[in-house]
Every structure is written in C-alpha cells, then in structure tokens.
Amino acid sequence: MKVLSALFVYSFLLSFLRTSSTLDTITPSQSIRDGETLVSASGRYELGFFSPGSSKSRYVGIWFGVSNDTVVWVANREIPLKNRLGVLKVTNRGILVLLDSTNTSIWSSNISRTAGNKINNPTAQLLDSGNLVVTDGNNSDPKSFLWQSFDHPSDTLLPDMKIGWDSASGLDRYLTAWKSPEDPAQGEFSGVLDRRGLPQVVCMQGDKIKGRPGSWNGLYFTGKPWLRPNPLFKYEFVLNEKAVYYNYKLLNNSILLRYVLNSLGNGLAYRWMARTQSWDLLTSYQSDECQNYGHCGAYASCNINESPVCACLKGFIPKFPKDWNSAYWSGGCVRGTPLGCNNGDGFLKYKGVKLPDTSSSWFDRNMNLKECEELCLKNCSCRAYANLDIRNGGSGCLLWFADLVDLVVLQMGGQDLYIRVAASELDHIEKNRHFVQKYQVIIIVCSAILLTVMLALGLVTYVRRMKLRKEGMNIRRQNDYNNEDKKEDMELPIFDLITISNATDNFANNNKLGEGGFGSVYKGTLLRGQEIAVKRLSKNSGQGLNEFKNEVILIAKLQHRNLVKLLGCCIQEQEKLLIYEYMHNKSLDSFIFDQSKSRLLDWRMRHSIIGGIARGLLYLHEDSRLRIIHRDLKASNVLLDNNMNPKISDFGLAKTFGRDQTEADTNRIVGTYGYMPPEYAGYGQISVKTDVFSFGVLLLEIVSGKKNKELCNSGQCLNLLGHAWKLWIEDKPMELIDEFLVLGDSCILSEVLRCIHVGLLCVQQRPEDRPNMSSVVLMLSSDNSLPNPRQPGFVAGKTSLGEDSSPGNLEMPSINEVTITVLEAR
C-alpha cells in the first residue's frame, strides 16, 4: 500500500513539474480545453475559456492574472462556443485553431508573417506583455513571429501594443469596442489612427468621428495635456514612410495599466491598485461635451468652464444666428470680414487650445514658425498655422487648408494656434484705439490697393483660364439621348502642370505607383496636403486625346461610392494628365494575386468587395444618365480605399449607350484577354452582358486567388473558368476556394459557394444566358434558389475565335495583363 501511495505521489509530482515547465506554451502535440489555461511566465496574464457577464456563451480570451474578469483580448469575438467542449490547438503550420464539440474550426489565426520556406517547430506562447504569439521554435525576435494577438486588438490597448499602420505587414491596427458587457462582438465604436493630413487618433461611431484626443505635438496629444511623459510610463507617436502608429511603454514594470474603449464609446485608462485589489480610473477620454467632435461647429471654440460653452472665434459670427441663440451650435461660425488674401491679412494667437482636426492639414518638419507664417500668408487657402513639435522651443510647420473644426480651449497645456483673420479684425487686439483711428486713412488706402491687386489677380487668372481653354481644356460632351447628336459644354476642374509637377516631384520614379500600355500613374501631394494619383498618358500610347476626353467626360459627373473620383485634369505642353483621389491600398490585384497580402483579405472583406463592384457596375448600366459599358473590368482596374472599399477605375475604353440602346457592334476589339466574352472577342458584339462576363471572371478570381490563365494538369489545359466548371460538375467546388479563406474565421461556406455559382452564371457562353447586374446584386444578397449554370465560354487555355469570325477585320485582344488602347470613335 505504501509503495502504491509513493508511486501516486511521484507520478503527480512529475505531472506537475511537466505542466509547470510548459505553463505558458503549447505545441502541436498539446491543446487547451475549457477549464485549462496558459499563464505567462510571471503570472501577469492568463489565457483560457470564459463567459462574459451573465452570458452562457464561451470565448477564448486573455485576462489579467490579478483580475480574471478583466478580459483584454478575445479570439472568437463573432462566433461563440455554445458549450464547454471547445479546444484550442496550434497546427504544424503554425496556425492557432479553435475547435467546437464537432471538431469544426470556428476561429483560426492564419499566419501574419513568414519565417522561411518551412516551419519546423511551431509554438504558441503567452508572453508577460499579454501578447499571444506563435513562433517557429524558441525564436523570440518579434520580427520573426508567425502571428501575434497584438496585431489584432480587441477593445483594450496594453503597453507596447500599437494603434496604426505598418507598411511591411500591411496591417492597420485599431481598437473595436464590445457590443455590450455580455457580448464581445465588434460594436459600433472603434479607435483608429486617421492617416489623412497629419495623422491623428480618433474615436469612430460607425463611419462618423465621435471624438479625438487631438494631434500629437511631440510630447502629448494637444487635447490631453495630462498624458505627458512621467516616471511610470511614456507615450510614443511614430510617423515615417514605413509606419504610422501610437503606443505607450511602461517605465515601471511593477504597475498594471490598460486603456479600454467601452461599449458606450468612452476611452478609459485604468491602473491596478494592489492595496484595494481594484482598478482605479486614471482618466476618461470622453469626459465632457467639449470632447464630442465638432460640438460647436466650424470656426468656434468650446470651453467647458464658460456658459454657454461655445463661442465664435474673434472675427467670426454665427452662421445661423437663430440656432446659435437657441444653443444649437453645430452650424458653427463664418467670417465677419472677408480675407484680403496676400495683402493685409494677419493672425490672431490662441493659447492653450486643442488643435483643430488635422485631416485636411499639411506639415513640414524642417521649417521654423516664421517660415510657417510666411508660407501660410502666401497661400490664400491657408486658414491657420502652428508648430508641428513643441519640444525645445518649437519646430516644424503645420498648416490648415479647410474649416477649423473641433477647437477646444483647455485650462492647462494645449498649444498655441495662429488663426488667419482680415486686417480689420486685428483692431480688436490693439490696446490703443486712437492709434488705429490715426492711421485709418492708411488702412483705407491699403484696402483700395488690396482691392486693386485682387482685381488684377482675378484678371490674370481669367486670361490664363482662357488660354488653357484654347489648349483644349473646355471638353465637349456628346449627348446620346434619343440617338441625336446634341452636344453640351462641360467645364472640368483644371490643374496647372507646374502644380502637378511639384506635387509628384517632377514625376519622380519613387512616386510611381504603376505602369501600363497607357502610360504611368504617380502619387502626388498638393501643397494643402491632399494626396492624389496622377495618370500620365504616354506620348507613345495609342490612347490619345479622344480617349483622354472620353475618360474625363464619362467619370467627371458619375457619383457613386464604388467608382473612383476624378478630381481634375490637365492638357498642357503636350501632357495629358488625369488627377484622381489617391487610394492607399492601390489595386485589387496587388492583394488577391499576392501570396502574402492575400491573407489580409478574409472572406468578410472579399464578399464586401464583390458586392461593391457589383453595385458600381449596376450604377453604370442602369442608374447613371447614360448606359455605360466599361469594357475593361479587371482586378487591376479596381482600386481599394483606406477601408478596403472597391472603386472601379480606368474609363478610357468605356462606351456609352443611349437609355434605349442595349447592344452594338464594333470592328475594333479593345480590352483585356481573359476578361472578354466570346461574342465580343470573336465578333465585336458589345452589350451590358460584356461587363457581366468580365465581372464573373473577376468574381472567380477573388474567390480562388488565381488569375484566369492556362492551368495544365494531367495533360489537360484549362483556364480558371474551365477549372471552375470542371470542379462544379464533379461536385467539388470547395477545391476552387483560396486555402486562406477556408482557414479563416470569417469564412461562411454557403456564401462562398453561392458566389462561385453566380460567377459561373455570369460567364455563360451565350449573352442571353447571363444575368444582368440588377439580378447579380440580388443573387449575391439573397438566399433565393439559382438556375443551374451551363458550360462557360472560353474554358480551354487557348480559344479560337470560331469559324465565322473574320480575323482580318478584327484586332486581336491583349493577354491577361495588358490593355489594348486603340479605340474607335464614340
């Protein structure tokens, strides 16, 4: 009996020692079940299964060791477990997987970074920072992490976590509040870093700004001066070409800090008090009405210690006096006296304020404050200026080129702001009113001179505009209604060539975004800080003045969230330039056809992109003034904005139809081979179903992550359409799906299969068998039954035009990468 007891104790101790030695890690041979936990080396953080509040649902999360009800990160936020039979594992490929009671994956981590061609010994470890990481072996270098929870925050910002963007990984890290204390799913509030102008942290409610702590001035956010460096922790704001992010670091590792964005949209900072065993509220980022974004409107200040809290800035009057007197201040204020532009304007200094919204600002690190003032005076659009950095007496230049919104007067800290006002408004800050009266005549003379200068500048501007019109900037637009040859004049925003040259550093190679048969696209930044994309048509391109005019005319007045916005154009000195809004995420093909970046597109995002493209085409076909056939829809012609919303671009090859016209013939084939339907590539027949075929090809590319090119297997050569059809008739459509989608936690298999079904319907051989775009949008958004597809057109890797085609009279389409740019007259 004693021997048995000794053996039991010995076995228990061995088990305890083995568990203790791997308490913070798991390998592919291990797992975590409900009731078991990982604990970081010092015991500061713990990972396991939990139920929030009174909820019975189970989630995998990380919480503080001293406070197990304080969850800082959740894995399966959107898909909870319904019982206590969940299992968390790490696979041999270094992917964390959460399995339910049926052994089905409901959440997985994927791989954010690569560690070479092969992963030998993947390990998941909970670090003392609260970061759950997956490494290859014991490699502790953060740059070598295969995946880390810090790249995917929930509602809590811990020390060393980052909020912002990183160019190497392409990640845009941000906080998202819980829906409620019982539901950790993403709520309506988020804490993001807005990269427009001078980047700033903002709290969003849906797609609207709820509040912001102000821009970074080198020491603190201008709206939160108490969040400055101290003996306990320091803040860091990094802004360079490789990264834009904010974080904070502990200087005393004995304390516990957390920042949380709660379900009401309030930002709260807490410190753990060991004496009371509770969290002490340090500060609230949304503590009074002045913290509500734009509470007083434009050109007004908010002061919580004044009554009323809102007041127009000096030199400004309420825009809507009745509303203002009734305490409805959101309409803001307007100038009481117009600016005199280059002559007579000055600046009023406001001390200790939270600087206004910087999303439409421009900045330079190397200028001093005097140079900043001079630059602002030279530009009639400049509204205000300030130092970019307040350290060491101040440095850098920050200019505003839009209405000043969300300016708050603070009782401590803040920053000095210089707001532009007319010369006459400067009288209010002069102590000696007699001095002003004495020189009243001089002021009148100066005003007369200023008026003369303004008139002269206006005349010069008028003459220059007339000259530009003679060079071709007044483009005439053909009206196709009722098949009549009516034409109407349409003036377009005109950019000067010098302005565009300066914005792109004279079309420098390091600003080049891409290049094609038409020419090149460059990134540029206007003086006011606005980022633009400049399409520069090559002088050797077949896309000439007519095609240039066609693209400008077609897109200039199209207003839809899924079409790229044209800002203006320029025809000067034999240059043909189109100026578009800049898309930070570039084109769709740079994601779906890139093995590493495609992992950033989960199914939720891809489904949203598919729907956006469909709605954009529906607008072109049915809701715009003219029926527009794009003719070159492909992955490289779909751009992605900051929020990964798709925008259809490049209308150089588009063709307009009258409202009653449904099809036409052409003897010149333009577009991209691989996206063209048979009737167009072979016979030159054009209709809305031309774009539907292209959309179907693009949809299948998005789902599969593969280009529509020749795929040879077992002696049989098929393109993507043929491959998809073969899998469909063999009842194996899941093999078409991008493997990263299958592993992702957002993948809804029924939606993916429905998209494949719709894609095959769109690429039918006969145009009449394809749905129109209104039907496609309905198919993608409903659960109605779909007709069975037939064999698509162009299923083989190489397809002939057919016996009835006349190659001698047709121009062959380009390959699946290059666009034909020789066009017919419109």
Image (cartoon, helix red, strand yellow):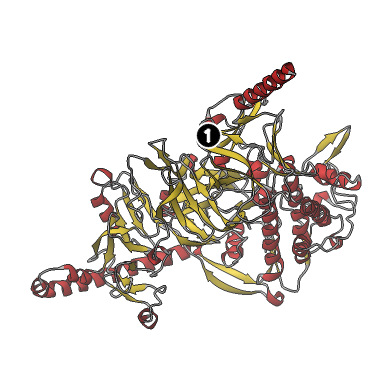
Using the image as rendered, state which of residue 115 and residue 477 is in the foreground. 115
Which residue shows up at 55% across the image and 72% down it? 489
From what the image shows, is residue 240 above or below residue 633?
Answer: above
Using the image as rendered, state which of residue 186 and residue 592 is in the foreground. 186
Using the image as rendered, state which of residue 813 and residue 690 is in the foreground. 690
Question: From the viewer's perspective, is 444 left or right of 309?
Answer: left
SS at mark 1?
loop
Question: From the viewer's perspective, is 370 left or right of 207?
Answer: left
Q: How far from the left and from the top, in percent, is residue 512? A: 52, 43
From what the image shows, is residue 354 above or below residue 48?
Answer: below
Which residue shows up at 62% across the image and 23% down it? 17
Using the image as rendered, state which of residue 193 and residue 626 is in the foreground. 193
Is residue 380 among what the camera can see?
Answer: no
Residue reaching furthest to the front: 1
Residue reaching furthest to the bottom: 322
* Kind of residue sitting beneath label 1: Gly
Tell me which corner region of the image, top left, top right, bottom left or bottom right, holds residue 590: top right
Q: How far from the left and from the top, in percent, is residue 192? A: 50, 52
Q: Quadrant of the N terminus?
A: top right
Number of dots carrying numbers: 1
From what the image shows, is residue 764 above or below residue 446?
Answer: above
Q: How far from the left and from the top, in percent, is residue 330? A: 42, 72
Q: Quadrant of the C terminus?
A: bottom right
Question: From the viewer's perspective, is 247 left or right of 25?
Answer: left
- At label 1, counting other C-alpha atoms closer than 10 Å, the crowd grade (few under 14, some 14-19, many 20 or more) is some
Q: How far from the left and from the top, in percent, is residue 3? A: 73, 16
Is residue 410 among what the camera can see?
Answer: yes
Residue bearing the label numbered 1: 43
Residue reaching furthest to the top: 3
